[in-house]
Amino acid sequence: ANQLMAGKRGLIMGLANDKSIAWGIAKALADAGAELAFSYQGEALKKRVGPLAEKLGSAIVLECDVAEEASIDALFDGLKQHWDSLDFVVHAIGFSDKNELRGRYVDTSRANFTMSMDISVYSFTAVMQRAEKMMNAGGSAVTLTYYGAERVMPHYNVMGVAKAALEASVRYMAEDLGKDGIRVNAISAGPIKTLAASGIGDFRYIMKWNEYNSPLRRNVTIDDVGKSALYLLSDLGSGVTGEVMHVDAGYHVVGMKAVDAPDM
Ligand code: NAD
């Protein structure tokens, strides 16, 4: 283990279970000496998040539903009872009605469009409004995005539109908070089998396609994402802000099916 995060305290949002991208990131940060606090969505997840937090030596586990302003306020009020400052934030939260993560984008309902944008995009901005007040120069935040923001991917639909907006919000917040020495970046992760991903149509096919056609000829793991998050959240990333970093085995550079990829 390294000590890249020694003396640093951070909030991890979006842990659901040990398959979550947030878990891969939390492990990498804890390994590097960070002190962690976790938020969870709703009582049902508390049973899962509590023991995972404990494994990484964290006793700070707070509820937060990012759809509610009061719940985000309560999270930060709770956090302030433990810590007077915050060095980093991990936002690994996204949501859309899975009935609209298949079929055509053009059929997206107004209600689900609004909800997907609210939970998957605005929540990061709302969190950073509060986090900023506890952060000093050297602070850093990371959110999670996907290539469906840049190119049309099957079934990703309204989430692609939401991730495009999330990536734009990363650039605007990088400018706003950069004056105070706070960095804001996104990791564009390749497909990983998680709870959230299981809602996406034909996800198994998408994983296979990425495995056969990405330059590294494999899918990425939550540990791959964790190591890149460690870079962005530690002093190693000190000159990097407003960036969307692809951690996708290189898939985003590919223009066509690989010659050695099997027919599917
Ligand atoms: P996950 O299901 O493990 O995590 C999603 C988290 O979002 C859960 O912890 C859930 O509780 C939380 N969440 C949803 N609605 C919420 C709300 N209203 N309030 C608070 N929390 C809420 O799945 P994951 O794949 O680890 O997802 C993490 C992030 O990574 C998401 O933004 C997702 O879009 C992104 N991402 C995932 C992949 C992938 O293939 N799995 C690829 C690229 C990006």
Image (cartoon, rainbow, N blue to C red):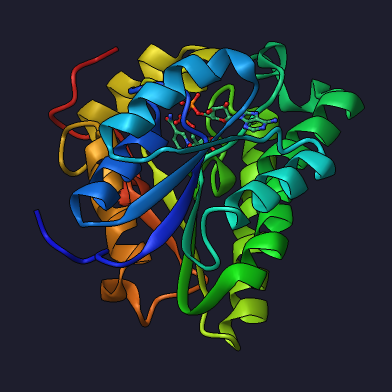
Numbered-mark total: 0
Image spot of residue 39 (x, y percent): 55, 37
Image spot of residue 148 (x, y percent): 54, 39
Residue at the image position 58 percent from the left and 46 percent from the top: 149
Residue lying furthest bottom: 179
- Is residue 120 visible from the viewing direction of this image? yes
Left or right: 62 as drawn, with respect to 209 = right
Looking at the rendering, in which quadrant would you find the C terminus? top left
Residue at the image position 33 percent from the left and 43 percent from the top: 26
Residue nearest the observer in this picture, 137 or 186: 137
- Is residue 192 visible from the viewing direction of this image? no
Residue at the image position 52 percent from the left and 71 percent from the top: 242
Image spot of residue 2 (x, y percent): 11, 60
Task: Tell me: residue 89, above or below residue 110.
Answer: below
Left or right: 109 as drawn, with respect to 150 = right
Residue nearest the observer in this picture, 179 or 95: 179
Task: Tell me: residue 31, above or below residue 204.
Answer: below
Residue 64 appears in which quarter of the rendering? top right
Left or right: 59 as drawn, with respect to 213 = right
Image spot of residue 204 (x, y percent): 37, 13
